[in-house]
Image: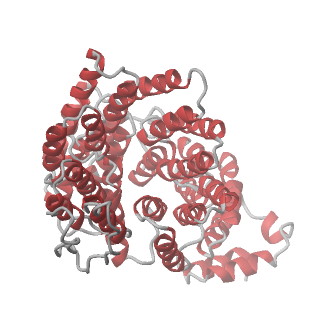
């Protein structure tokens, strides 16, 4: 049996590894290969390329697809009409995607005329450009809106818009109409909430996500990303944990999970226990997944092994399949350099990252921090310039507005009109965006400095009752309220507030400090006996002082 017939027979039986074995033991210069017609050479090469792909040898597969394409130019005209290379290009693209040659994959698909391309080729091209390059690269937006396979194409279009692409008025109208015509209620809600997120109306986006049912893997990960945009780290952590509780073999956004874990867990012992448990679970994950390596980088950074953390971050960046993951790996690198007091190196990384991902607020926030920590003559001025650029690119972003107001507040002299205007701006932002925990805490410090304790107390109480307040912020506000009660000499309220603090590892120390604050000193004319600490649980009456001392509450 001739080689081509043998390969075709094995191919029809899906014995792909046998095809690879047979071909590799055949001399490429033998007559069985060189004497084939152009048509049969194409068939043989495609069979072999497909066999390598199915055998997960993607580099070899791409190599053989690349050999096929020039052969089409040698086909007779009568065969060329019915012997299209579009399918081969699509398969070539798939092999290149597996080995992360995204730019080369884009060039391969670009050769197919877009208007006449099959739907799967159009979608592959649009997804490649959207997810891996983050810009439209001259794509036909109207085609994405009008395509019959609407939901898949609209999802890609919304990703483009959230990454900064602008639409004309007609395109916006057509897009809104297209979404409204969808029959699937969940899909309509899913696409509609993208309108809210791209307009930085994150609270409404969260409301719509919570209304989707069932709360599956993808919805939970989307909630995590929105919570991350809102600065709600504990909620982001919980959403990713929820997603992976049912899909333990998947590892998307585990890099983000490890990052927020470091930010919300206090105490080295507790953090190391959580990290060790998570690292054990990640051993089952795909080692080719960039999220896994970002997570390992976060673990190394938490254990102060910074050289290893940077190595993992670079590895993740090189294999990152999308802009989100690349940005996360750069945040990790920049954060490590800030921790090591290498602020200039961090600034270089962040400025480079902003070029590719200009809508990422966290880059601007980290860049401001890196510049100010350099403590140079014009550091504050340079930081203000960064904030101005951030406001130009993210004018409606709540986090950007907050950063702008808080930084400018620090540059105004207390008691001046400009300072009071910044306070008023922060108060308005606190009303508009109650989930940004930095605002009430900053206002609290300003009120304390001006001795406006009642105003501070009222503002903190109002903030603590808002349903959007992040979990970690609630405990911080309770601490601040306890401090205010202590300052005003109200031990009962101070105790109540400290008891409301959630998940605080040093709660016992805080209670002891509070007791000492309200304990009246013994009569200096005689030595007071040593007092025992109050029993636990907390909230019990204080231990009485000697009879000749002043009466305590």
Q: Is residue 300 above or below residue 426?
A: below
Visual colour scheme = secondary structure
Specify the quadrant of the image occupied by residue 21.
bottom right
> Number of labelled discs?
0
Specify the quadrant of the image occupied by residue 300.
bottom right
Is residue 237 or residue 131 the one in the foreground? 237
Q: Is residue 27 left or right of residue 493?
A: right
Q: Quadrant of the C terminus?
A: bottom left
**Residue at the front extreme?**
525
Give the x, y percent position of residue 397: 31, 35
Q: Is residue 512 above or below residue 194?
A: below
Q: Is residue 244 above or below residue 219?
A: below
Q: Is residue 490 visible?
A: yes
Specify the quadrant of the image occupied by residue 147.
top left
Q: Is residue 120 left or right of residue 69?
A: left
Q: Residue at x 36, y 20 (%)?
A: 413
Q: Is residue 318 left or right of residue 361?
A: right
Give the x, y percent position of residue 32: 79, 71
Is residue 117 or residue 503 the one in the foreground? 503
Q: Is residue 2 visible?
A: no
Q: Residue at x 59, y 71 (%)?
A: 287
Q: Residue at x 78, y 75 (%)?
A: 24
Q: Quadrant of the N terminus?
A: bottom right
Give the x, y percent position of residue 149: 29, 52
Q: Residue at x 26, y 15 (%)?
A: 417
Is residue 383 or residue 43 the one in the foreground? 383
């Amino acid at each position: 049996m001739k080689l081509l017939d043998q390969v075709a027979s094995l191919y029809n039986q899906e014995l792909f590894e046998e095809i690879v074995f047979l071909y590799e033991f055949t001399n490429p210069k033998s007559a069985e290969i060189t004497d084939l017609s152009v048509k049969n050479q194409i068939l043989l090469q495609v069979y072999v390329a497909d066999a390598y792909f199915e055998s997960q040898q993607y580099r070899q597969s791409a190599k053989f697809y690349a050999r096929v394409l020039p052969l089409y130019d040698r086909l007779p005209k009568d065969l060329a009409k019915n012997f299209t290379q579009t399918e081969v290009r699509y398969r070539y693209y798939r092999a290149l995607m597996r080995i992360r040659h995204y730019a080369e994959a884009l060039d391969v698909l670009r050769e197919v005329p877009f208007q006449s391309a099959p739907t799967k080729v159009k979608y592959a091209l649009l997804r490649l450009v959207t997810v891996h390059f983050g810009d439209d690269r001259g794509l036909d937006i109207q085609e994405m809106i009008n395509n019959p396979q609407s939901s898949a194409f609209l999802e890609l279009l919304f990703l483009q818009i959230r990454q900064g692409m602008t639409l004309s008025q007609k395109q916006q109208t057509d897009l809104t109409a297209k979404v409204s015509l969808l029959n699937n209620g969940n899909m309509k809600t899913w696409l509609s909430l993208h309108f809210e997120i791209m307009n930085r109306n994150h609270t409404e986006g969260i409301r719509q996500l919570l209304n989707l049912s069932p709360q599956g893997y993808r919805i939970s990960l989307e909630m995590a990303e929105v919570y991350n945009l809102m600065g709600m780290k504990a909620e982001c952590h919980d959403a990713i944990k929820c997603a992976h509780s049912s899909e333990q073999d998947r590892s998307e956004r585990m890099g983000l999970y490890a990052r927020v874990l470091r930010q919300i867990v206090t105490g080295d012992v507790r953090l190391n226990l959580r990290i060790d448990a998570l690292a054990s679970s990640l051993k089952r994950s795909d080692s080719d997944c960039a999220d896994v390596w970002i997570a390992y980088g976060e673990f190394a950074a938490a254990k102060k092994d910074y050289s290893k953390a940077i190595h993992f971050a670079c590895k993740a960046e090189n294999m990152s399949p999308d802009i989100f993951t690349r940005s996360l790996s750069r945040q990790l690198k920049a954060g490590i350099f800030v921790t090591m007091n290498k602020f200039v190196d961090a600034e270089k990384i962040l400025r480079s990252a902003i070029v590719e991902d200009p809508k990422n607020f966290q880059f601007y926030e980290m860049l401001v921090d890196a510049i100010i920590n350099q403590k140079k003559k014009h550091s504050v001025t340079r930081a203000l310039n960064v904030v101005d650029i951030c406001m130009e690119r993210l004018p409606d972003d709540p986090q950007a507005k907050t950063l702008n107001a808080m930084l400018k507040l620090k540059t105004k002299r207390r008691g001046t009109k400009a300072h009071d205007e910044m306070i008023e701006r922060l108060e308005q932002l606190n009303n508009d965006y109650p989930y940004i925990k930095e605002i009430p805490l900053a206002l609290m410090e300003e009120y304390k400095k001006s001795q406006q304790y009642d105003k501070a107390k009222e503002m903190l109480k109002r903030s603590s009752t808002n349903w959007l307040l992040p979990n970690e912020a609630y405990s911080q506000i309770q601490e601040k309220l306890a401090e205010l009660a202590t300052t005003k000499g109200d031990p009962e309220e101070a105790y109540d507030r400290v008891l409301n603090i959630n998940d605080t590892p040093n709660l016992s120390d805080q209670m002891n400090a509070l007791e000492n604050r309200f304990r009246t000193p013994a009569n200096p004319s005689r030595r007071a006996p040593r007092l025992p600490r109050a029993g636990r649980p907390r909230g019990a009456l204080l231990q009485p002082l000697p009879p000749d001392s002043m009466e305590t509450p």
